[in-house]
Image (tube, rainbow, N blue to C red):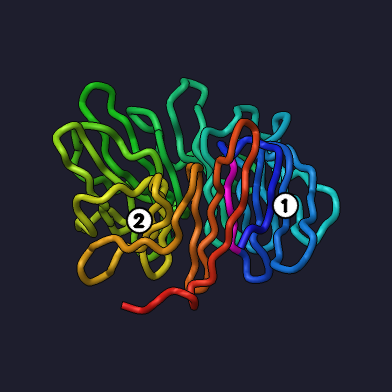
Amino acid sequence: MTLLKLDKTAYHARLDLASDAVYLLTMEAAFRLVPGQEPTQTKLDLSDTGVATPSAFIFWSKGSFWLAPKQGGPPGPLASVKNRPIYIVAVGERFAWIGANEQGRHTVYVLQGGKPHPLYAMSGKAVAATMAEDRIVFVEQLGSEGWRLGSVPRGGGSPGFTATRKGRFPSMLAAAKDVYYYFFDDKDVSEIWAVSPDMQTERVVAKNVICSPLAVADRVFCAQMQGVFEISPTSGLPRLVSPSVASSITTIAADRNRIAWVNDVGAEKLEVKLLDRSALPSD
């Protein structure tokens, strides 16, 4: 079903599957979407980095972090942070961010005592980030050397890393029990990988499949030009679950009951789609 049609760009939009609603986050607002009800809008300066927790929206604006309760009410300041974050990530009610430190190095931060506390300063630059369990996970581009995945505990401690890889770096990460990413290069390699949050184990989930953007719950869901696909957990083969006609999918989210995605349906126009997973045939 279509939850929302909006005269806004589909790019930089994000989705949050909450227990009571689907939330669409745009640069300027959060939209609460419930099947059978009129959408409600809360204007917020979310930019392209604001995130949702189970109870609130967290975002940076005008030199500070802010928290806006989902149930309504004005945003309240969390902390003064001078530099605009590159990424904000969250698990549950906990959040962290990646931003430039005083020397310009991309650095993982958390709040401690209401002030920014650095956890790890990168030698390269962050090009994707998420949170899994209680670790901040990121893709670190290492100049001409390639890229690697890294993670650091939110409570502090030594970071973990995968081996450095050549080729195109992943443009996004999707977190479940493991962290998933789509990797392809110019040599006909097109794979979905999963890595443990501590970076100790890696595995190939599927080969010869296009999966960008991707979402993960108990299964992996991939957006392609043809529509939304589900990856079989046994064979690794994709199965079309919803075709897409004359539009591209810019973001996708999934949980055990639902799949939601944003379609780019023209210049400055988007649609939010929702699919009940109980309607899908079982393997």
Which residue occupies 58% across, 53% down? 15
Query: Which segment did they paint magenta?
Result: 12-17
> Would residue 23 be seen by someone viewing this image from the given angle?
yes
Taking the image as shown, residue 180 lies to the left or right of residue 110, namely: left
Q: Position of residue 207 (x, y in %)?
A: 19, 53
Q: Quadrant of residue 85?
A: top right
State the predominant SS element of the stretch in magenta. strand
Residue 178 within the segment the image draws in magenta: no
Q: CA distance from mark 1 to mark 2?
A: 27 Å
Which residue occupies 50% across, 27% down? 101
Give the number of marks. 2
The residue singled out by tag 2 in the image is 179
Above or below residue 275? Residue 184 is above
> Would residue 137 be seen by someone viewing this image from the given angle?
no
Which residue occupies 52% across, 59% down? 91
Crowding at label 2, few (<14), some or many (≥20) Cα neighbours within 10 Å?
Answer: many
Q: Position of residue 37 (x, y in %)?
A: 77, 65
Q: Quadrant of the N terminus?
A: bottom right
Amino acid identity at mark 2: Val
Which residue occupies 52% across, 22% down? 102
Nearer to me, 123 or 49:
49
Looking at the image, the residue that sits furthest to the front is: 245
The residue singled out by tag 1 in the image is 31
